[in-house]
Image: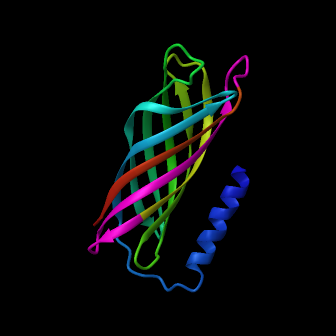
Amino acid sequence: MNKTLTVGIAALALLLTAGLAPRAQAVYFSVDVPVAAHFEVEDFSADLDSLSGYKLGLGNLIGWFGVGYESYKGDFKPSQFSEAVELDYTFTNLLLDLPIPLMNLTLGYGVGEIVAEDGKPSWDATQQFINLGIPIGAVFDVHLGYHVISGDSNNKPDTGDAKATTTTVGVRVGF
């Protein structure tokens, strides 16, 4: 599924940029916060409570490319658990900002990890995400992001692979 999503994102990027003349692009800084997250591992699944954290991005550094970092925390408590387990997500991201008229479209790929509060279990994780922004003036936007995350278990015994989604909202300013 992740390969299909990655190929789909790449195809969308090519389709949207085919034939577009380059436009003036400002380097931008963006800040996002998580508003919703869902986590699954094995037969356990739940929305994360007490969600906090941030995503920072610096875009259009080299052409349409930029970099980002994100860190989130949330409490995972499926109905089978007696107590919540705090999960920490951290990712380093590569951003692709596409020059679409009337909206800001950013595609991203990140590499990182998901770790439970006691350090075990943990998962090496990757994510793909999309941000859709509404420009306000020439250098400001408000945007919504959707992240699809998959994690490979680092645990002995194996706790199974993880899947997650996160929704974010944010702003960006060009300079």
**Picture quadrant where residue 135 is located:** bottom left
For the stretch drawn in magenta, the main secondary structure is strand
The magenta stretch is 133-159
Residue 13 colored in magenta in the image: no
With 44 as the anchor, is 172 left or right in this view?
Answer: left
Q: Residue at x 73, y 17 (%)?
A: 157
The image position of residue 72, as x and y in percent, is: 43, 36
Q: Is residue 10 left or right of residue 173?
A: right
Image quadrant occupied by the C terminus: bottom left
Where residue 138 sits, quadrant-wise, is bottom left
143 or 46: nearer the viewer: 46
Depth order, front residue of 23/31 = 31
Question: Residue at position x 35%, y 66% from top?
Answer: 27
Q: Is residue 158 left or right of residue 149?
A: right
Q: Residue at x 40, y 65 (%)?
A: 133
Side (left or right) of 105 relative to 44: left
Residue 84, position as x, y percentages in the image: 49, 19
Residue 19 vs 9, above or below: the answer is below
Q: Residue at x 56, y 24 (%)?
A: 78
Residue 12's quadrant in the figure? bottom right
Percent x, y of residue 69 = 44, 45
